[in-house]
Amino acid sequence: MRKYGRPYHLPTSPGVMSDDKILRDLSVLTAATEVVFTEKMDGENTTIYQGGCHARSPDSGYHASRDWMKAFAAVISPSLAENERIVGEYLFARHSVAYDNLNSYFLGFAWIVDGTVKTWDSTVERFNILGIQPVSVLHRGSFSDAAVNAVLADLDLSKQEGFVVRTTSEFSETNMGTCMAKYVRADHVQSETHWMNAEITRNGLKKA
């Protein structure tokens, strides 16, 4: 079991907290042949591996909202190799953003094999094989201020948390700090009570 890293914030991200890091050098993103912008979802970072699943920290304890995730992972994990991990956002319990039209309570965004974050296209292919829904793609192309502004223009930051941008090529987990970054809305956390200490409010799934 391994903890998934925390992407750095873009310099323009207004949602930087005291314990967050900012990506000051954007050269890897700007030099990339292609990047993909995906919607940053407001859930619980969760990893599925051969033996089950865990929240961001492998030693995370029990919470009633995680029962759905454990059942979902029990179906997926037998198909994973020992060196393979699937990482995504678990969205069963409402945090600061309410969702009522989700494709699934688990939306994948990374496929990691032997410490390598695989290409975006191979990641989506692997998700298709496993029956995992990916996070929504907002834009693909080169990285630039114009691309960032275009993505932001299409977001409703009263209802969406922000975006994550990464190179579409593969990279080592040790290079997450340069090959990907995030933009989070200002004042993202809008509740005085942490979601884990509040009554569970279930997000909504897309109607069939």
Image (spheres, helix red, strand yellow):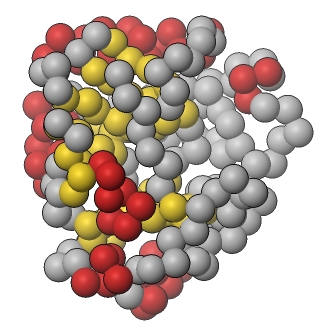
Q: Where does the image place residue 87, in percent across and percent down from the top left?
A: 35, 36
**Quick check: can you spot residue 161?**
yes
Give the percent coordinates (x, y) of residue 116: 20, 46
Q: Nearer the viewer, residue 142 or 115?
A: 115
Q: Quadrant of the N terminus?
A: top left
* Numbered marks: total: 0
In this view, the residue farthest toward the bottom is: 146
What percent of the width, then of the height, locates residue 71? Answer: 38, 9
Residue 103 x %, y %: 38, 37
Where 24 falls versus 86 (above or below)? below
Residue at far right of view: 192
Q: Which is nearer the eye, 177 or 98?
A: 177
Residue toward you, 24 or 130: 24
Q: Considering only vertical position in the picture, is 143 above or below 173?
A: below
Quadrant (top left, top right, bottom left, bottom right) of the C terminus: top left
Q: Is residue 18 above or below residue 52?
A: below
Which quadrant of the figure has residue 29?
bottom left
Rendered residue at 59%/62% (across/down)? 21
The answer to whether 88 appears left or right of 158 in the picture is left
Q: Is residue 50 left or right of residue 164?
A: left
Can residue 156 be seen?
Answer: no
- Which image quarter: residue 161? bottom right
Residue at horizontal 72%, vertical 23%? 196
| Residue drawn at point x = 68 percent, y = 37 percent | 95
Residue at image location 28% in from the left, 21% down from the top: 49
